[in-house]
Image (spheres, grey):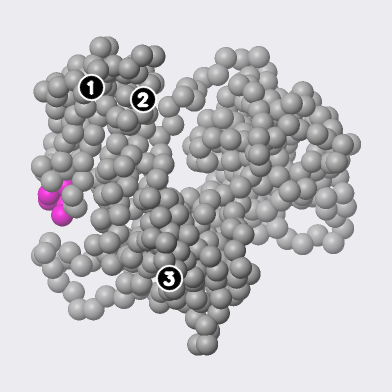
Amino acid sequence: MDRYDLVVIGSGPGGYVAAIKAAKLGRKTAIIESGEIGGTCLNRGCIPTKTLMHSSHLYSDAKNFEEAGIHFVGISFDMEQLQSRKEEVVQKIRQGITSLLESNGVVIYQGIATILNNNFVKIKNGTVLENKNPDKDADKQLCQADFMNEDTSRSDLQLEAGKILIATGSKPAIPKLEGTELPNVITSDELLNKKTLYKKLLIIGGGVIGIEFASIYSDFGCEVEIIEAMDRIVPNMDKEISQSISMSLKKKGVIIHTKARVTQISKGENQELICEYEEKEAMKITSAEGILLSVGRKANTEGLLAPEVQIEMEGANIKVNTDFETSVPGIYAIGDVIRGKQLAHAASAQGISAVERMYGMEPSVNLSTIPSCIYTSPEVAVVGMSEEEALAQGYCVKTGKYPMLGNSKTVLSMGERGFIKVICDSTSEKILGAQLLCDRATDLIGEFTSAIVNGLTIHEMTSVIRPHPTYGEAITEAVEDVEGMAIHLMPRKR
């Protein structure tokens, strides 16, 4: 039986980053993966979705070619080729992660892991991934196809672990509705792999995943309809952001229903899918070729724990303390299996912090400020507190806002309407939050994240020279606008 200082279960952004961190600290580390290296984010989430979105945005932007002085005869897309490119991107990144794990001495196992107790993990039909080409370049090292090759000689393995880290991620939640088992009623996992597009896609759920697929399908000229139970789409975002995304999607022809509840899905006479829903106290019906179930994700813990391992839960999530340790000493959990933001970069940061904590180190990453991004067109990125949240917490706030149609780079790039909004504490003048709706928002948000983490003030933000012409210039304009704003409301008691 092999013994390790740390056994990580799950090779997504949280798991593989944690494993590498532990190995760099000199700990003998193993990682167990039941599917493909890279987890959900790489194989069924962030990377394939954004790869397809890149293509869909290019196709949509082609409508502006004539205005830019570029002439062409006809334009089309090949969905099979788009899927092939997506797989190439995923495979390249997957090989890179595998190479990183191997070069840091992390032993990779494939199989289904079950935690027997706080010191032993069983791997059903387990096998170890060996680096057959240690002297080759990273892109020529053992690829996932070798990793996944069927091995009839496999048997159950058992590892001894000083500590165990759960990083098994999440999977799409299936709502309790009649008809969810019908053909073409699918989750994002299946939709990402389709080599043909539905002529009309109905999306149940207007969260981030739902609107990103709405963006892809509408860019390619398909009909899209969204049914959202809350009073607006992406309800966890700032209200102004939500309204702007809604306007942008409607401009592309997307039909959006809010405060609407789906009651049933059935098959029509012509094999189309029929969706019954309640909106404004009236029962309505719509139809589509395909229906995307996009009502959220749930922790992936099925079969993870042996019956005798009783870990305290928070609903469907594993409960952890501030060190990411569960109620069972020596067993830790990070990422989507615990309560909090279900984001790849959040899981990576938690993985680093958990490893540092379990080995007596102070965390090197500030986990209090986590940016969120949506890759629509224009992009959306937010960090810190919104104006409403800051006021609710008792801050006396100032805000600054700059419309992106006044930004030279946006104008010359034929960008859409958008803005950058900054919130600061009027007493200390420190940045509290920012909301961005503009091109390259997901890249620009890092500057505001750094500002909040490091306690930068308005003056410190305006003292920076930003190059011209760039989208980043709008940060200066938005921050400078704070200086001319009146204080909003009186501070509440803290």
Label 3 environment density (alpha carbons within 10 Å; few <14, some 14–19, many ≥20): some
Residue 156 seen anywhere in this rendered image of the structure? yes
Three-letter code, disc 3: Lys
Residue 100, horizontal then vertical, whole percent:
59, 39
Q: Quadrant of residue 396?
A: top left
Residue 412 falls within the magenta-colored stretch:
yes
Q: Is residue 329 left or right of residue 481?
A: right
Nearer to us in this view, 168 or 178: 178
Q: What element carries label 3?
A: strand
Q: Quadrant of residue 286?
A: bottom left
What residue sits 53% from the left and 30% below the top? 349
Q: Is residue 365 above or below residue 8?
A: above
Report, in whole angstroms, how far the alpha carbon at label 1 lies from the one at label 3: 43 Å
Q: What element carries label 1?
A: loop
Q: Is residue 75 left or right of residue 212?
A: left
Three-letter code, disc 1: Leu
Q: Name the residue under label 2.
A: 392
* N-term-proximal mark, 2 vs 3: 3
> Which of label 2 and label 3 is nearer to you?
3
Q: Name the residue under label 3.
A: 284
Q: Mark 1 points at which residue?
A: 489
Residue 266, horizontal then vertical, whole percent:
56, 76
Q: Give the range drawn in magenta.
A: 410-414
Q: Is residue 281 above or below residue 460?
A: below
